[in-house]
Amino acid sequence: MTATTRVPAADRRRQILDAAVRVFARQGFHTCRVSDIADEAGVAYGLVYHYFRSKDEVLDTLFLERWNVMVALIGQVDEQDLPARDKLYAIASFIVDSYRRDPELMKVIIVEVTRAANSFGRTHLDQIRLAYDRIAVIVEKGMASGEFRDVVTPQFAAMAFYGAIEQVLTGWIFGMLPTGDEEYERAKGFVIETIFGGLAA
Amino acid sequence: MTATTRVPAADRRRQILDAAVRVFARQGFHTCRVSDIADEAGVAYGLVYHYFRSKDEVLDTLFLERWNVMVALIGQVDEQDLPARDKLYAIASFIVDSYRRDPELMKVIIVEVTRAANSFGRTHLDQIRLAYDRIAVIVEKGMASGEFRDVVTPQFAAMAFYGAIEQVLTGWIFGMLPTGDEEYERAKGFVIETIFGGLAA
DNA sequence: ATGTCGGTTGACTGACCAGTCAATCGCACG
DNA sequence: CGTGCGATTGACTGGTCAGTCAACCGACAT
């Protein structure tokens, strides 16, 4: 196609990854063809296979490079000397901001990996679970310190917390919830109001 | 195969649907072949197409016949004269019991439809949204009556509530949360403790 | 018995697409 | 300028599978 000019290998690789995000977000992983990614990147079909062993590896790469950042973030947050409530807020903030910065990438990660339980979700189960476990640790400490009520298991609370956030992102992705910067900012507080404060009057 | 004996059309249709649930749960919709469904049902390949126009229609049928029951249930619950908290508990109970009764069917509905945002989730968006909207109505009434704090939008609370439940089911499906009748029963209360009561001490 | 109707069968087809590979291109270095 | 090597190209292949269809069969009616 039009990739005649030489550029550093890392740049070309990124060019393909970025194109893949757009294509996966638009058409979905299973429905798109590798040629769609190549076309979107302005690159020949075969070049995708020069940089990646398979179509799967493209998605694996996109998922891992983002998810690992999140897992690390959760760990860092937990190490800080903050009330457990604020730790959860920091995590909700990070996820919401990730969506705001690159909605297409977050859509792909959630729709094609995190929630694709029979394909990539299974492949990356351990990595996904790691995030849940780290959230559970935060909840557990919150209970130990008396900040949180000891009425549910930390694992359960972690799943409910993460599930609530992911569902809200899903709502944005499919236009079921209003979008926009103000909404995103409000949502951070809403998550904590709902899960920490509770709906009860 | 072994479908030589005549049975009523409705029974044969159900036989194929039941087989499809097992196959979809085991292999996933995209990964399984129509011949897998036929084999599992003990029926010839072509017979699947006698009862259904396409592979998609098999999943559509499974989803709709169960989801419509849930949407109706939410409507009925809302019409009852109950505290909003108890209404949410009734909905959580129904979903958890649905999973307990037929985990494979719930797995298929969640994994292949509800969370399959680029394929069937999109097709059935209106129907899925209907459930969320009805939950939001319950939350809204709870706020109007003063039972719930007016700190988040009803739509947001509905998404968080449903997202939390679905994530817990996902946890069971993939062995991330402990399973068993006692766990299922506890989970009903846990959902309300988390979303209604809140984690705050 | 014989015929009819519709449920049942499974081999076949057409389309699709991931991945391969031999040829080409263009930069860097002698 | 060559020449060599790695990036780049895109036509091709092999396999897969959804959906079709003509033949078959068995229950029931006459």
Image: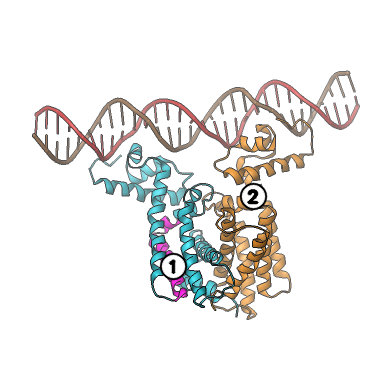
Chain colours: A orange, B cyan, C red, D brown
Q: Residue furthest front?
A: B144
Q: Residues within 10 Å of mark 1 (few under 14, many from 20)?
A: many
Q: Is residue C20 above or below residue A119?
A: above
* Bounds of the magenta segment: B83-107
Q: Amino acid at mark 1?
A: Ile
Image quadrant assignment for residue A43: top right
Image quadrant assignment for residue A200: bottom right
Q: Which residue is mark 2?
A: A104
Q: Is residue A167 above or below residue D17?
A: below
The count of marks equals 2
Q: Is residue B3 above or below residue B81?
A: above
How far from the left and from the top, in percent, is residue C15?
A: 49, 30
Cα–Cα gap, marks 2 and 1:
32 Å
Q: Would residue B95 be visible to someone looking at this image?
A: yes
Which chain is mark 2 on? A
**Residue B45 is covered by the magenta coloring:** no
Q: Which residue is mark 1?
A: B91
**Residue B92 is covered by the magenta coloring:** yes
How far from the left and from the top, in percent, is residue C8?
A: 28, 39
> Dot 1 lies on which element?
helix
Q: Nearer the viewer, residue A185 or A28?
A: A185
